[in-house]
Structure formats: structure tokens, C-alpha cells
Amino acid sequence: MIRNPLSHLLLTGALLASLFAASRVAHAAPAFEFDDPQFIFNGDNWNFGINFRADQNLQVDALGYFWDTEFSTAAHNVALFSANGVKLADTTVDAGDALNGHFRYSPISTVTLTAGASYRVVGASAGDAYFFDAVNFSSHPGITYLGNVYSGLSGSTALFDLVPEGSNDRLNGEWGPTLSVSPVPEPSTYALLLAGLGLMGVMRKVRREKTARLL
């Protein structure tokens, strides 16, 4: 028998609110992916840059680099730049980083991308595998791919600036670097989550106090 229907209703409502809010906090996903790299090359030192636009506010929690399980062995410097060349984050991607699809990802401190702003993610090939004309290439729904640029490297650890040697004429560019993104949760999502958790905490406290009085 339910002795206090109101308290049970409030507790159920708080739980449902928390679950709903938690479901709206999206998980990170690759910014770019494809079914098959199609053409893979090894050797030479290049910097590859991917230009893109954020079509919604996004969080970046990792930078990545293409990884072929047969040929890739090197460590790759990867960096994220704003449209005016300000470096927002950098890291090194190597064999110890998590493999997701065709890329390995190295975590970074979260960077927020602003809807409507353009960016460039840059990676050094370090003589390792890279690819072009990928089959069924696709972008994250919150991102528009704007093109691919490249430059020669003076050293395997160099990262190029805003003066690339040229743009690629491939179907979707020559690839190495990428990033992992997730939508920025709306403030109302966090408010709903916190409110639900807070109400659940209050109800548990009330129940404990009632139980103590009955003992």
C-alpha cells in the first residue's frame, strides 16, 4: 500500500526529469568519417589542414589523426586554429590513443566552437599514412566541411600557419587530422537535471527523517 502518494509522485517526477535532462547531454562524435579511405599513401612530411564551419555551438574534447592499422606507426602533432590563426588547442596523437573508426583521438581540455564561425584543424603526417578521395565521406550534422589545404614540412613536428602552399583538388581533400565534437548543452538542460537531482535529494532526506521518527 502506498502511504504517501504525493511523495511517490514527486520522486517519480524528479527521476524522470533527471533522466530526460541527462539524455539531452549528447556524447562526443567524430567531426568527419567515411566508409573506405580508398587511396592511402605513405612517406614524405606534410601538414594537412581541414577547414570547416561550426553550424551550431559545439564542444571539442579530442583531436585526432587518421590511423591505418597496417601502415600507421608515427606520432602526429595536431592543432585546432580559429579562422584568424589563433591556436585554440594542440596535442599529439599516437598508437596509445583510442581508435574510433578510422582515426585515433587524443583528449584535450574542452574548447567551445561558436555557431557560424570557421576553424581549421591541422595535423603533421610525420612520414606516416594519409589518404584522399574517401568513399561516402560525411560530416557531423553540426559542421560544414569547407575544404582541405596542405603545406610541406620543414620538420616532422612543424604545424603550419595561415599560409598553406595550396588547396587540394581531390574529391574531398587529402586527410590526416580531425576532431571529436558534441553539442553544447543548453542551460535549461543543466537546470532541469540539477532541479531533478535536488528534488530527489530532498525527498530522500524527508523519508529518512520519517523513518527515524518511527524507530
Image (spheres, grey):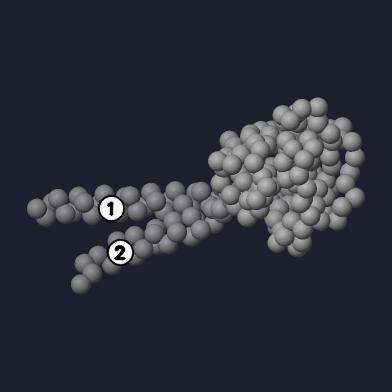
Residue 204: assigned label? 1
In the rendering, at what x and y percent does residue 39 appear?
Answer: 79, 55
Name the image quarter holding the N terminus: bottom left
Q: Is residue 58 visible?
A: no
**Furthest-left residue in view?**
215
**Quadrant in the rendering for residue 33:** bottom right
In the rendering, at what x and y percent does residue 185 appear?
Answer: 58, 49
SS assignment at label 2: helix
Q: Residue at x 9, y 53 (%)?
A: 215
Q: Is residue 46 placed above or below 104 in the rendered structure?
A: above
Left or right: 205, with 186 as reference point: left
Of mark 2 and mark 1, the one earlier in the sequence is: 2
**Quadrant in the rendering for residue 45:** top right
Q: Is residue 35 visible?
A: yes
In the rendering, at what x and y percent does residue 66 appear?
Answer: 69, 47
Name the residue nearer the viewer: 120 or 97: 97
SS assignment at label 1: helix
Left or right: 112, with 213 as reference point: right
Question: What's the residue type where badge 1 is placed?
Answer: Arg
In the rendering, at what x and y percent does residue 57 appear?
Answer: 67, 47
Left or right: 98, with 135 as reference point: left
How far, Cα to Cα, is label 2 from label 1?
Answer: 11 Å
* Number of marks drawn: 2
Q: Residue at x 62, y 46 (%)?
A: 104
Mark 2 nearby-residue class (10 Å; few <14, some 14–19, many ≥20):
few
Question: What's the residue type where badge 2 is placed?
Answer: His
**Furthest-bottom residue in view?**
1
List the residue tagged with mark 2: 8
Query: Badges 2 and 1: C-beta atoms under 8 Å apart?
Result: no
Q: Is residue 168 placed above or below 39 in the rendered structure?
A: above
